[in-house]
Amino acid sequence: MSLALGLVLLGLLLVYAGVKGKSVSSLLLGDATTPSQKPSSVDRTGNSGASTGTNVPASTTGNKGSPGGGLAEAFYDPLGSYDNGKFGGPIGGHSTHVHLSITEPNLMLRAIAVAQAMGLHVGENPYVGNVSPVHVDNSYHYRTFPGTYNGRQLGQAIDVTGNPSLMARFYVLATTGKL
């Protein structure tokens, strides 16, 4: 193997380790450590809970690294896409933010709480602010869950912005059912 190819592979391993929140040695040695920060969740009444699935139905917490039952879409062009049960490549227009569409309100509240706990900005959802009229006509951004949550409407999509490595980590958490 040439030195250039070795350096490229090492660089990819470093990026992957950063996205997964693991050290390179743990990946190489097979140590199954988890990221050190434990995200919080918020239930419909606004109570905080641990990341163990508290106040979130089991169907939304994922299974063996697959997205939870409530995840409809996840787009982040540097890492790819998830749409209706299928993973794919970049779709375009999502290199500056992570887009999530979620069909279960408790999972949406949890996604918002996790993103905010990571220091990311959450927008394009009436729960956290306004929804801009820039999305495709049938976008989840224009759909809301029935009722109110903590006195506010809750939309079925969010756009998450901030530090690119944190956005990558958030996208991985969402698409592996670890929100």
Image (spheres, rainbow, N blue to C red):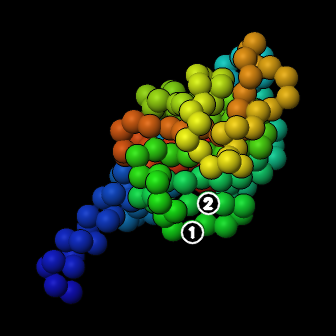
Residue drawn where x is 41% and y is 58% of the image: 78
Is residue 134 shown above or below 117?
below
CB within 8 Å, label 1 to label 2: yes
Is residue 176 shown above or below 99?
below
Of all residues shown, which one is farthest toward the top?
151
Please say whether residue 109 is visible from this viewpoint.
Answer: yes
For disc 2, the marked residue is: 82
Residue 169 placement (x, y as % from top left)? 46, 46
Q: Amino acid at mark 2?
A: Tyr
Q: Amino acid at mark 1?
A: Gly
Query: Going from the N terminus, do you reach mark 1 or mark 2 first?
Result: 2
Residue drawn where x is 24% and y is 71% of the image: 8
Residue drawn where x is 68% and y is 48% of the image: 137
For disc 1, the marked residue is: 88
Of all residues shown, which one is farthest toward the left?
3
**Mark 1 Cα-neighbour bin, 10 Å: few <14, some 14–19, many ≥20:** few
Q: Name the image quarter holding the C terminus.
A: top right
Residue 9 placement (x, y as % from top left)? 28, 72
13, 33: nearer the viewer: 13
